[in-house]
Image (cartoon, grey):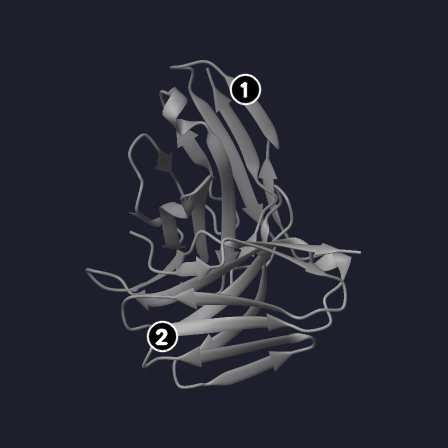
Amino acid sequence: EAQVTQNPRYLITVTGKKLTVTCSQNMNHEYMSWYRQDPGLGLRQIYYSMNVEVTDKGDVPEGYKVSRKEKRNFPLILESPSPNQTSLYFCASSWSENSPLHFGNGTRLTVT
Amino acid sequence: SQQGEEDPQALSIQEGENATMNCSYKTSINNLQWYRQNSGRGLVHLILIRSNEREKHSGRLRVTLDTSKKSSSLLITASRAADTASYFCATDARRTGGGNKLTFGTGTQLKVEL
């Protein structure tokens, strides 16, 4: 089954404790992207990747890192999480940057 | 600011009625996409309409695009309780510095009551 898999589904952590949210897709998509969703603000892009070893900042990249060492994986790294990063995070992939996106089921992160 | 703005923010209808949601945007686009999100879950792509298209159908969905007014509408006919979800428009436009960017609106929450 074609899918984007994110883990974990829920995560509660404390300020400053490094964490990684994993994302993997099995559709051989070149384009991958991370979004955060906050009430009243819709989805905002954090980082995106056009292909392996090619990543770039989206609209709200501060406090986040990503890597794209393999085509299928695109982890999101929070080196020192802060409470304002409490949000619902989505990973998505597609054939190209203007093709329909396939989304993962989300990771709800709470930083206390 | 958001490229796409949906209207209304929330809509409540009876099963069997039609639901219409609107999306307005600000800049020239390559295409416009509609997505659906069930509560807290990932978004699911519904339909894509290119800038040179005016209308597109997919099952009970009808999307129109008016580039002169920079607006689009999503019509769901004969709605069902299972259509209850949030609906988002997303505009694909040129990104400053090159490439394309998909920007999401804040969504319309649709509730279909039995």
Query: What chain letter is assigned to the residue under label 2?
Result: B
Query: Which residue is drawn at the image coordinates 28% and 34% (left, top)?
Result: A62
Please name the amino acid that badge 1 sits on.
Ile
Residue A87 at x, y percent in the picture: 47, 32
Q: Is residue A96 left or right of residue B44?
A: left
Q: Are marks 1 and 2 in contact (CB under 8 Å)?
A: no
Nearest the viewer among B108 and A99 is B108
- Which of the 4 quarters of the picture holds residue A41? top left
SS type, badge 1: strand
Cα separation, mark 1 vs mark 2, equals: 39 Å
**Counting other residues with Cα less than 10 Å from the Cα at mark 2, is it few (<14), some (14-19), or many (20 or more)?**
some
Query: Which residue is drawn at the image coordinates 34% and 66% (left, top)?
Result: B25
Residue A49 at x, y percent in the picture: 38, 52
Q: Which residue is mark 1?
A: A12
Relative to A40, residue B82 above or below: below
Query: Which residue is drawn at the image coordinates 39% and 73% (left, top)?
Result: B71
Quarter holding the C terminus of chain B is bottom right
Q: Which mark is residue B30?
A: 2
Q: Is residue B1 left or right of residue B45?
A: left
SS type, badge 2: loop
Relative to B4, residue A14 above or below: above
Q: Which mark is residue A29?
A: none
**Counting other residues with Cα less than 10 Å from the Cα at mark 1, is it few (<14), some (14-19), or many (20 or more)?**
few
